[in-house]
Image: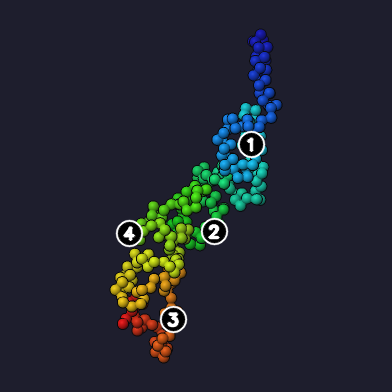
Amino acid sequence: MNACLPLIVLLLALLSAPLAALADENLTDGDCIKCHLDAVKRVQAKGAAHGAMGCQDCHAEHPPLGSDIIPACSLCHAASESSHYALQGCSGCHHPHSPLEMDFSALAEVKPACLSCHPEQDKEMTEHPSLHAEQDCNACHSAHGLKEGQFSNCLDCHDGHAPQQTNTDCTLCHKPHSPKEVTYNDELPSAQCAPCHEDVATMLAKSKRKHAELNCATCHSGEHMAVTSCDDCHGQPHGVMHQKFPNCVDCHLNPHALAE
């Protein structure tokens, strides 16, 4: 054994020599790109502020001499500067080479991360409970960073109120984060109301009075179940009679099928 000891010492010295030389070298980004071309291309294309940094600004060590190859985000990003610093693990959402192109695949539940940046949606779902509010955000939304409007089609989960109804039709009345709060603008076509209010649509279709020529939203303006006062359009056309019979429908009956 003693006879072999000098050989072992010599062998270890020979093996450590290249590592010692490597430790003395000053690596450049040009050295990194030889092995990490994809990473360099990604940070140049999508790195945002990270794209202006050198590789070694973040990666101070390299195997086998060092093991701390992934730096702590907090070295540059203070918790006080973050709107969601309470979340654990920046890399759960942000890829270091493309920090604005987020990937939530590593998170078991994405809602806490989403709502930390989207408090308006959190408030809306809290104030207007629905089955939508019970879902995780990725049940409807694709990965963050996709083009605006790329989310699930309502009709993937819901049957339309009418044949040939489209996703755009759904959003004319229903807000995705508060679907039970039905609101719409005054230009909403009456055809969107008819599937849920068939009896009213039938009466209007048979009527020859001017109400049949109006959009539903002309009288039922702004939100579901809203009812406009007759006076808003007609004033008091009957003078003294109107004072005696202030309720218009006592004489004109159903506003959707006005009496002659």
Q: Earlier in the sequence, mark 1 or mark 3?
A: 1
| Residue 55 image label | 1
Nearest the viewer among 66 and 6 is 66
Amino acid type indicated by mark 2: Glu
User: Which label was assigned to residue 148?
Assistant: none
In the rendered image of this protein, does residue 11 appear above or below residue 191?
A: above
| Of pointers 2 and 3, the one earlier in the residue sequence | 2
Q: Which residue is mark 2?
A: 120
Please provide percent x and percent y for residue 209. Answer: 33, 78
* Labelled pair 1, 4 in contact (Cβ < 8 Å): no
Residue 29 percent coordinates (x, y): 64, 33
Whether the residues at callouts 4 and 3 have beta carbons within 8 Å, the answer is: no
Image quadrant assignment for residue 12:
top right
Observer-side mark, 1 or 2, equals: 1
**Residue 96 seen in this snapshot:** no
- Amino acid carrying label 1: it is Cys
Q: Which is in the foreground here, disc 4 or disc 2?
A: 4
User: Which residue ends up furthest to the top in the rendered image?
Assistant: 3
Q: Which residue is mark 3?
A: 231
Query: Which secondary structure, mark 1?
Result: helix
